[in-house]
Image: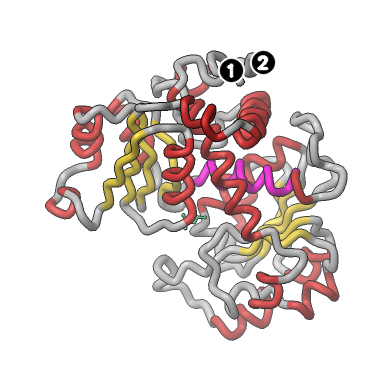
Amino acid sequence: MTSMTPSVHSAVESAGYAAGSLLTVADLPVVEVAAILAATDRFEQMVSTDRARTLAGRRIALLFYESSTRTRTSFELAAKSLGAITTLVSDKSSSIEKGESLKDTGLTLRALGAECIILRHANSGAPYLLARSTGLPVLNAGDGMHEHPSQALLDLRTILARLPGLRGRLINGRTLEGVTVVITGDILHSRVARSNAMLLPRLGAEVLLCGPKELLPEEALGLGEGVEIERDFDKALKRAQVVMMLRIQQERIAGLELDLADYILRYQLNEERLSACAPSALVMHPGPMIRGLEISGEVADGPNSAIEEQVRHGLAVRTALLVRALSADGFASVTV
Ligand code: CP
C-alpha cells in the first residue's frame, strides 16, 4: 500500500471556498498540478473493483446550464467508475427553466445530499457564487469566457504523453521548457485558451496566441508571462511543437465583423499548411470542432492529431479531480 502525496488546498481554502474546489488554474500551485497528475496515473492503473470503492455511495451533482458532450460525460463516467452516485440537472429540464436562481438550485442539491457540484455555466464567475453559497466543493466545468480548468489539466497530460521526451518527466516550473504551444482561433471567447495560457507557461512553456484582431485583442498579453501574440499563422506554426485549434463560437460572435472565407484562408489548419510549416507538430482541439472551418477533416483524423486522446485524458484527469474534491485532505487519505 502506497500513501498518496498530500495535496495542497490552501489557496481555495484561504479564499473561503471548500477544499478540493477547482474554480481556476490561476491559484493552482505547480506542486498541486503534479499531485493531480500523479493521482491521475494511479487511478488509471487501479483495478476497477478497487477504484469503485474509492467514492462508493458518495453523491455528486452535475449542474449544466450549457450543452456539453465531453466534459459532462467524462465527469459522469469518472464519478461512476469511483462508485459515486450521480445526478444530472440541466437548465432545459429542471426548475431553472421556471426561474430558480443558481444559489437556490445549489442549496436544493445540497439539501438532497450532494457533496460536490460540477458546474458548467454561461456566466463567467458562476462557480464562485455556487461555491460560496453552498460551501460545497465545486468543480468548474467551464464558465462563460472565463476558465475551463480541467480542460487545461487534460491538455497538459496529453502534451506530456505525446511529445517526445516528456513522458514521466517531473512536474515543475521547467517541465515544458523549449515547448511552444500555438493556440489559434477565437481566443476572445475561449475559456480553454485562457486556462491553458495561464497554466502552461508556469511549467515553462511558451504560449503563442494567434488570430485576427477581432478574435484576439492585444489585452490577451495580460494573461501572464510566457504569452505572446503572432497574427501570421504560418509564422506561428513554424515555432510550434503543439498547435491547439479553437472553434469559431458562432453563438458568441454576433456583431463582430468576421469574414469566414477570409478566416479559413488565413487560419484554417489544413494538410498543406501543416506539412509546410509544422510537419511534426502535435495537433489538439478541445472540441467540439467544426470540420472545414478552423480545421480540415484530414488534419483532425491525421497522424499528428491527439484529439481523441485528449478526450481519454479528460476521463482520467477528472477521476482524480473528483477524489480530490471529496477527500477532506485531498489525496492524502487515499491508498492504493
Ligand atoms: N471541451 C469541452 O468542453 O467540450 P464539451 O463542450 O463537449 O464539454
Q: Which picture quadrant has residue 259?
A: bottom right
Residue 306: x, y in percent? Answer: 69, 59
Instruction: Relative to 237, say whether 273 is above or below.
Output: below
- The quarter of the image holding the C terminus is top right
Between 109 and 249, the residue placed more toward the observer is 109
Between 185 and 121, the residue placed more toward the observer is 121
Between 271 and 52, the residue placed more toward the observer is 52
Q: Amino acid at mark 2?
A: Thr
Disc 1 residue crowd, few under 14, some 14–19, many 20+, Cα 10 Å: few
Q: Which mark is residue 160?
A: none
Q: Secondary structure at mark 1?
A: loop
Q: CA distance from mark 2 to mark 1?
A: 6 Å
Residue 4: x, y in percent? Answer: 63, 18
Residue 144: x, y in percent? Answer: 41, 51
Q: Which mark is residue 335?
A: 1
Q: Which picture quadrant has residue 7?
A: top right
Q: Mark yes or no: residue 223 visible.
A: no
Disc 2 residue crowd, few under 14, some 14–19, many 20+, Cα 10 Å: few
Which stretch is magenta?
148-160
**Residue under numbered circle 2:** 2
Q: For this view, does 304 lie left or right of residue 249?
A: right
Q: For this view, does 268 lie left or right of residue 75?
A: right
- Looking at mark 1, is its residue's CB closer than 8 Å to ligand 1? no
Q: Amino acid at mark 1?
A: Thr
